[in-house]
Amino acid sequence: MNSIIFIVLRKMRVPLILLILCYAIAVFGLTLMPGVDELGRPWHMSLSQAFYVISYTATTIGFGEIPYPFSTPQRLWMLVSIYLTVIAWIYAIGKIITLIQEPTLKRAITEQRFSRQVKHLKEPFFMICGYGETGRNLLEALDRMDLRAVVIDIDEARLNDLLISNFHYDIPTLCGDAGLPAVLETAGIYNRYCRGVFALADDDHANLAVAVALRLLNPKLPLLCRAEEEGMAENMAGIGATSVINPYRSFGELLGTAIRSIHHYNLGDWLTGVPGQMHQTIVSPPSGRWIVCGYGRFGKAVVGSLQQEGIETAIIEADPALTGCTDCLVGTGSEAGTLIKAGIADAVGIVAGTNNDHMNLGIAMMARKLSPNIFIVTRKNHHFNGPLFEHVQADLTMQTSRIISHECLGHLVWPLLTTFLALMKRKPNDWVEQIYRESVDLIGLRSPETWEITINEDQTPAIAEALAQGREVTLDVLLRDPGDTERPLRCVPLLHFRADRKRTDIRPDLLLAEGDCLLFCGRDSAQKRQIQVMRNINALDFLLTGQVQPNGLLWRWFTQRHSNTR
Amino acid sequence: MNTEKVVFGFFIVLAMTLNFGFFIGEYNNLLHHPVYELFAAIVVNLIATVLKFGDRTQIGAIHLSTSLVADLQLITSAIVWSAVTDMGEIPASDIASIGSVVSLSGGAFLANVTSVVILIVETVMMRR
C-alpha cells in the first residue's frame, strides 16, 4: 500500500502546487477588486468570502454573485480566475488519469493485490513457477481436486491466458522472475499454508535459479523441479530439491515398465491421472526389434531404457553429428526408404520421437502404411496438436506436460499414493493385474480421485464412537452404500497403515482400530457417502446391523419397551 | 548548487517567516495581525507540504508530518477567523476569539520552526 501512495504523491506534486498557486492568485486578486454593497457603498470582499466564491467557481458549480452583485472589476477578475482555475483542475485530473495508466503504478497495484490475495489464502496451497503447458496441466488438476495454487511467470501474456481460462478458484498470479527472492517472498514461501513449490519453466536455468533461491530462503519447503539436461538435474538434486523430474527419462522408464509388465504401467497411469481424465488402457508393447526415430534427449532416454530391457534398436537420426549418434541411419524417418533400410519389415515397434510434431505424425503414418501391425509410440510436443495425434491412433503417446504433471501430483500432492506406487513396483504381475481389473471394473476408466482416511475422533467420529463402545467395525462399512447396503461404493482401498506397518492386500473383513490410516481411490460420490458413514452414527448402525435405529429418546424408549414385552 | 534544494529551502523558510510575521504582536489587537499575512502563510505552507510529498526516508516523513501539523493549525486559525468576523464582513471585537486565532498560528509557527531545524540538521549532516 505504502509504495502506491508514495508513487502517487510524488507524481502529483506539480499539479497540486499549480492548483494551490492558481487558487491563491484568484482569491487574493478577488479581494483587491473594488465592489459596492446593496446600498452603493464601496465594499471589498473578505478573504473567506473570496475563497468561497472561487471554490464554487473553480469546480464549475457556480452559485452566482454572492453576497452582492459584482462590480465590473470584480467580474473581469472572475473571468481571469475561471480560466485559471479550471485549466489547473483539468491539468491535475489529466495527470491523475495518466498516472493510473502508468506501468509502474499498475505494476505496484497488481503486486499489491497479489500479495493480499496470497495472505488471505487461509488454506493449503502450492506455488507454480512457470506457467507453460505443464503448469497449466498441473493447475487444472489441482483446481479439480479443490486444491489452491498461486502462479508466477515472467511472461505477462501467459498469465493473461490464465486469467481468461475457466478455473473454479480465483488463482493469484504474479508477473515476475521467480528466481528473485522478493518475488518468492511475495508469493508466500514463508506462508505457513504453502505446501510446496513446483519449478516448471521450460528453461532449466530458470528452474535452477528458483531451486537455489528457495533452498537458501526456506530449506524446509518441498520443492519439485523440472530438468531436461542430466547435468542440471544433478545440480538441482545436489542443492536439495525434493525431487527432480526429467520428463524424457521418466517416459523412458515408463516405456521400460510397459514392456516388462503392462499392468504395472496401466495401474500407475490410471491412478496418477488427473481425476476425471479418460485413461487409455494400452496393450503390451511387443518385445523384439524396435526402430527409434530421432536421437535427441528423448530418443536417448528411450533407447537407454529399451536396451536395459534387452531390446535391440535401430536408430534413425537426421543430424548424427549434432546429437552425437555413432551408429545410426541418416534420415528423418518419414520417408519409406529409410524405414525399409532400418528394417521395418521385421521390427515390432517404432518410436517417433523428434521434436517436431508434424514429423512425428508423418513417421507414424508412414510406419502404419509399411507395416500395419507395428506398435507405434509417438512423442507429442504440443498440447494443441492433440486431435491430430488421436487420428493417427498411436499405441502410446508421450506428452511432456502430462508426464510432468503426473509426477508432480504423485510426489507432492499425494505422498501416500507415492508410497503405494513404490510398493506396487515390487508386486508380481498377476497381483497388479487383478487390482487393476477389479478397480477399473468398479470405478471406471476415468482416472479416480484418491483420498486418505484416519480413524480417529476428528475425522470419523461415528466409527470412533462405535469402537469406544467395544463394537467390532470392519472395513466393509466404508465400502457399502449407506442408502442401499447391497450396492458397493465405487471405491477401492489401496493401502492400510497401522503403527508403521503398510499393507496392500486389504480384505473387507479387516477390523478397524483407532489410529488406522487408509488410502482409497475411487469416485467423488463414493467419498461423500463414506463421509456420511464416518460422521453419522445412525448411518453406521444401519450398515452394521441392517436395521434402522430409532433416533429420538422417546422412540428409543418405546421400541425398547416393545421388544421387552414381546 | 541544486535548484531543487533552493526551492525546497525557500518555501520552508518562507512558510516559517510569514507565520512568524502574522503571529508577532499584541495577542488581542487584530491590527497587529494582518489577515493577508495569514492567507500568504497558508498558501506557502500548503506548497511546502506538497514539496515534501513522496520522500520515503525517515527524515522526509518527519518533514511531512511537521508540515501537516502547521497546515492543520493555520487552516483552523483561518476558519476561526472567518467564523468570528462573519466571513470577514465585520471587524472582530471579541478578544477571546482574536486570541484563539493568534495562538493557533503560534502553534503552527512552532511546527514550522521544527521543520526548519530539521532542514538545517539534515544539511549539516550531509557535509557536502
Image (spheres, coloured by chain):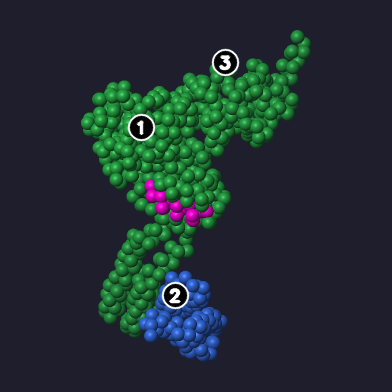
Residue A232 placement (x, y as % from top left): 44, 49
**Lateral position of residue A528 relative to residue A468, left or right:** left
Specify start and end residues of the magenta stretch as a single range: A202-215
Q: Chain of mark 2?
A: B
Which of the chains bears the disc numbered 3?
A
Image quadrant holding the C terminus of chain A, namely top right
* Alpha-carbon span between mark 3 and mark 2: 79 Å
Along the line of sight, the residue nearer the viewer: B66 or A78 = B66
Compute the Cα span from label 1 to label 2: 76 Å
Callout 1 amino acid: Thr
In this view, the mark in front (1 or 3): 1
Indicate the position of residue A496 as horizontal and vertical percent values.
Answer: 61, 29
Q: Does residue B11 appear in the picture of this structure? A: no
Callouts 1 and 3 close, C-beta under 8 Å: no
Task: State the image coordinates of residue A241 (x, y, percent, origin top left).
Answer: 51, 48
Q: Confirm whether the magenta stretch covers residue A533.
A: no
Residue visible at 41% across and 68% down in the picture: A9
User: Which colour denotes chain A?
Assistant: green
- How far from the left and from the top, in percent, is residue B116? 49, 83
Instruction: Say if labels 3 and 2 share a chain.
Output: no
Q: Is the residue A111 above or below the residue A21 in the image?
A: above
Give the distance between the C-alpha atoms of the residues marked 1 and 3, in whole angstroms.
53 Å
Q: Residue at x 41, y 33 (%)?
A: A307
Q: Amino acid at mark 2?
A: Lys
Query: Which of the two residues, B127 or A45, is positioned nearer the viewer here?
Result: B127
Residue at numbered disc 1: A313
Nearest the eye: A345 or A190: A345
Residue A203 falls inside the magenta stretch: yes
For label 3, the residue is: A486
The verdict on a common chain for dots 1 and 3 is: yes
Q: Chain of mark 1?
A: A
